[in-house]
Image (cartoon, rainbow, N blue to C red):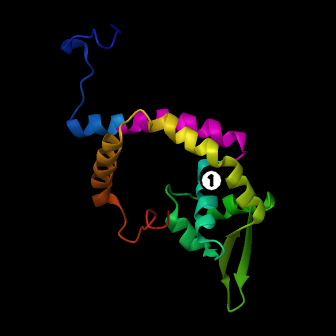
Amino acid sequence: MNSRASQTESQRVSFDSPEQEVFLQLWRTYDCLKVLEESLFVQFELSPQQYNVLRLLQMAAPETVQTMELGRRLISRCPDTTRMLDRLEKRGLVQRSRLPENRRVVEVAITEEGQTLLKRMEKAVVQMHGQQLGHLSDSEQQRLIRLLQKARAPHEDASCDWLDSL
């Protein structure tokens, strides 16, 4: 029997509320799963947000995506999308262009190099997700998805359509 299982009720951590416990469980779970994600992406010299950008652009290809729209579709907020795009462009993974009719609007597209990188990563990403959550049954995964959507719904900006863009 492990030490956690042998703890008595009086030794258990107490929380201020059930909501606090849920939040801290979510946070800890994210932290555990993030370690696997980061160890994968570092092998390809990408951050999780850069990978997200490349995936969004891949799905839009051959069309371009305006930087403001790209920022809106990201799974997690990025305070400096321009700098992130600078790094991806420097590596030849994305290409930016300005609209002739409105030079303030910047459009972004994934390059062949970006497509190739995603293709190289594909199997490793699938394996990572399996390692992260493959121990849950299909029905448990579906139930978790519904619960997370329900928990997030009252806090999500109505204009956020990141799931529609995946």
Where in the figure is residue 114, as x and y percent of width and height?
73, 60
Q: Is residue 142 above or below residue 11?
A: below
**Residue 80 can be seen in this image:** no
Classed neighbour count for the residue bearing mark 1: other residues with Cα under 10 Å, few (<14), some (14–19), many (≥20): some
Residue at 69%, 60% in the rendered image: 83
Is 1 drawn above or below residue 50 in the view shown?
above
Looking at the picture, tell me which residue is in the foreground, 42 or 111. Answer: 111
Q: How many marks?
A: 1
Look at the magenta stretch and give its main secondary structure: helix
Q: Is residue 40 magenta?
A: yes
Element type where label 1 sits in the image: helix
Amino acid type, residue under disc 1 in the picture = Tyr
Q: Which x, y percent locates residue 91? A: 79, 57
The percent coordinates of residue 23 (x first, y second) are: 32, 40
Specify the farthest residue to the bottom: 101
> 52 or 137: nearer the eye?
137
Q: Residue at x 37, y 39 (%)?
A: 26
- Residue 91 within the magenta-colored segment of the rendering: no
Q: Quadrant of the N terminus?
A: top left
Q: Residue at x 31, y 40 (%)?
A: 140
Report the front residue among 114 and 35: 114
Q: Magenta residues, as a range?
A: 26-46
Residue 140 makes an appearance in the image: yes
Residue at mark 1: 51
Image quadrant in which you'd find residue 116:
bottom right
For the point 32% across and 48% down, which residue is it? 142
The quarter of the displayed image where residue 27 is located: top left
Q: Position of residue 7 (x, y in %)?
A: 27, 11
Q: Is residue 82 left or right of residue 156?
A: right
